[in-house]
Image: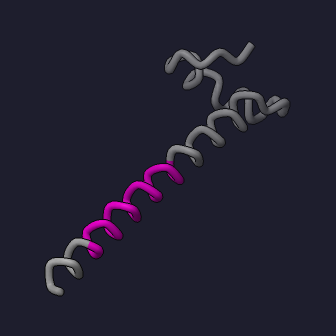
Amino acid sequence: MFIQSTRSTLVSAVDARVLTGMAMILLGVTLVLAVGFAPLADVHNATHDTRHATGFPCH
C-alpha cells in the first residue's frame, strides 16, 4: 500500500512538472510570435534590437 501511494505521488509530481513546462513553452512561443509579427510600430521598435540579437527575423 505504501509503495503504491508513493509511486502515484511521484507520477503526479512528474506530470505536474511536465504540464507546467509545456505551458511555459507555449506561453514563450506565443509571446515571441505575438511581438515578432506585431504590426504596431511602437512594439516593433521596442523589441527590434533584441529580435535581431537572438536571430529572430522581423522584416
Task: Answer with left or right where residue 15 lies relative to residue 6.
Answer: right
- Residue at 37 percent across and 59 percent down: it is 17
Q: Taking 59 as reference, is 51 above or below it?
A: below
Q: Is residue 23 rendered magenta in the image?
A: yes
Decide which of 53, 7 is in the foreground and name it.
Answer: 7
Q: Quadrant of the C terminus?
A: top right
- Residue at 31 percent across and 66 percent down: it is 11
Decide which of 38, 12 is in the foreground and name it.
Answer: 12
**Colour pattern of the rendering:** one colour
Decide which of 30, 41 is in the foreground and name it.
Answer: 30
Q: Is residue 30 rendered magenta in the image?
A: no
Task: Tell me which segment is drawn in magenta.
Answer: 8-24
- Residue at 84 percent across and 30 percent down: it is 39
Task: Answer with left or right where residue 39 lies relative to residue 58.
Answer: right
Query: To which quarter of the image does residue 31 belong?
Result: top right
Task: Answer with left or right where residue 35 lies relative to residue 27.
Answer: right
Q: Residue furthest bottom?
A: 1
Q: Quadrant of the N terminus?
A: bottom left
Q: Position of residue 14 (x, y in %)?
A: 32, 61
Q: Taking 14 as reference, is 48 above or below it?
A: above
Q: Position of residue 18 (x, y in %)?
A: 40, 54
Q: Position of residue 22 (x, y in %)?
A: 49, 49
Chief SS of the magenta region: helix
